[in-house]
Amino acid sequence: MNTDEWYDGSCDLINSFNFISGKWRLPILWYLSHGNLRYNELRRHLCGITNIMLTRSLQDLEIHGMVWRKQLSNIPPHVVYGLTDQGKNIIPVLEVLEAWGETQVNFEKRND
Amino acid sequence: MNTDEWYDGSCDLINSFNFISGKWRLPILWYLSHGNLRYNELRRHLCGITNIMLTRSLQDLEIHGMVWRKQLSNIPPHVVYGLTDQGKNIIPVLEVLEAWGETQVNFEKRND
DNA sequence: CTGAATCCCATGCGATACTG
DNA sequence: CAGTATCGCATGGGATTCAG
């Protein structure tokens, strides 16, 4: 499927959106936008996430250059994650999305 | 699962994000943000979409108050779709997402 | 022209158990 | 502490067919 021809104007939109789709990617980026975190710190914030999902999500984000990974010591293991410059570009998206989420809530209340 | 406790600060973010997840919702909102469209006009823009997916997506968006539906004539059928006021609130999100998509493309080029 | 009904499959997600 | 391996299920997406 050649998506280039399909969405023309909305192509960038779709690509970027697909990129951050996935249940845990956005929450991860969100928390990392507030500061670097260790593996288990991140996991505590993301209540309900399992090791396998946190690992996968972080690997995906790292592969796509959104997140960096720094291993500070091996024994005991000590790994820190943070946003790359590229990853920081997403912060405005998070903010607008959050703002929009609030307007959604207001709309729902009004329609009760 | 009580998501309220989980994401605290990112809760609105997640809810709003889940809401527009789905392969075709964003493209639909995108095209409708440029003007009202008939069923088949929309379908022509969304190359590759099937009737069932277009119908489902439009119904979802209508149920959630993002899109209105107006049946102008019955024979032959003539139906027009457009964004509600609530739906228009998402336009800033689309714009920021699109802008971010462009920076993503630039990053990828730089890393070739 | 504008859909709906049915069935099927790929993928994402996750429970569980295990490791250096 | 910071992961990995395996297996299985639920969900969303879609092909096909039919209809007012």
Image (spheres, coloured by chain):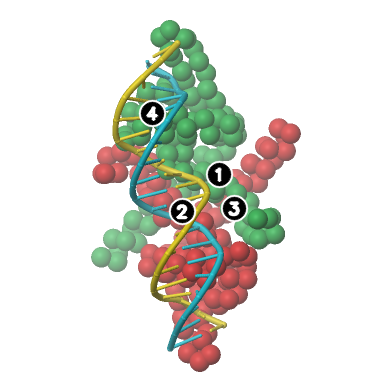
Chain colours: A green, B red, C yellow, D cyan
Task: Say which of B38 and B102 sits in front.
Answer: B38
Between label 3 and label 1, give the one nearer the viewer: 1
Quadrant containing the N terminus of chain A in the rendered view: bottom right
Q: Amino acid at mark 2?
A: Ser
Cα separation between marks 4 and 3 = 30 Å
Q: Residues within 10 Å of mark 4 (few under 14, many from 20)?
A: few
Residue at figure coordinates x 51%, y 39% from the top left: A91
Of helix, strand and loop, which one carries label 1? helix
Left/right placement of residue A111 relative to residue A93 reads left
Residue pointed to by mark 4: A51
Is B98 located above or below residue C13 in the figure? below
Residue A96, percent across and down?
Answer: 48, 48
The CA span between labels 4 and 2 is 24 Å
Mark 1, residue position = A19
Name the residue type under label 1.
Phe
Q: Is residue B65 visible?
A: no
Q: Residue B51 appears at what percent x and percent y? A: 52, 71
Name the subunit of mark 1: A
Residue B104 image offset from top left, x and y in percent: 63, 41
